[in-house]
Image (cartoon, rainbow, N blue to C red):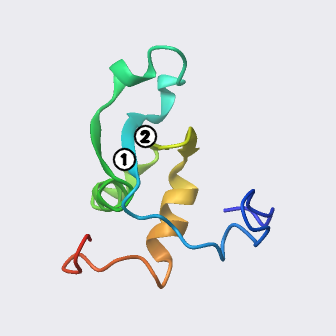
Amino acid sequence: MSSSPTTFRGEPADKAPVEWDDRAELHRSEDGGGVFTRFKTVRRGSLVELIRFVMHLPEGDQHRYAIEKEGDHRLSIGEIRTLAARPDFPAADAPGG
């Protein structure tokens, strides 16, 4: 995650609350996005569900995936791992998590 401010409130991106329930799509990281990106979706779910999915893959395979978050933001494995390590990352047994 970068230290550049978010567009809404001007706080650093790593301190801003994360909308864990936002809709997201899992893609192969080499699919390149583009016009037909929705046809290349591997899996759909909430942001937290897809982060958990990637983090449960063998470490050597995790870099092969990226998450396309609602609002056209693509998360690489570095951002995925950073989000998974946040203290506010929802526990698997938490409501909505």
- Per the model, the C-alpha gap separating discs 1 and 2 is 6 Å
Residue wearing tag 2: 64
Q: Of 26 and 10, which appears nearest the observer?
A: 10
Residue 95 lies left or right of residue 52; in this view the side is left
Mark 2 lies on a secondary structure that is loop
Q: Position of residue 32 (x, y in %)?
A: 54, 24
Q: Amino acid at mark 1?
A: Asp
Residue sticking out furthest to the front:
8
Q: Amino acid at mark 2?
A: Arg
Residue wearing tag 1: 61
Q: Residue at x 38, y 24 (%)?
A: 38
Q: Residue at x 46, y 46 (%)?
A: 63
Above or below, 34 relative to 66: above
Disc 1 residue crowd, few under 14, some 14–19, many 20+, Cα 10 Å: few
Q: Position of residue 1 (x, y in %)?
A: 66, 62
Residue 66 lies left or right of residue 95; in this view the side is right
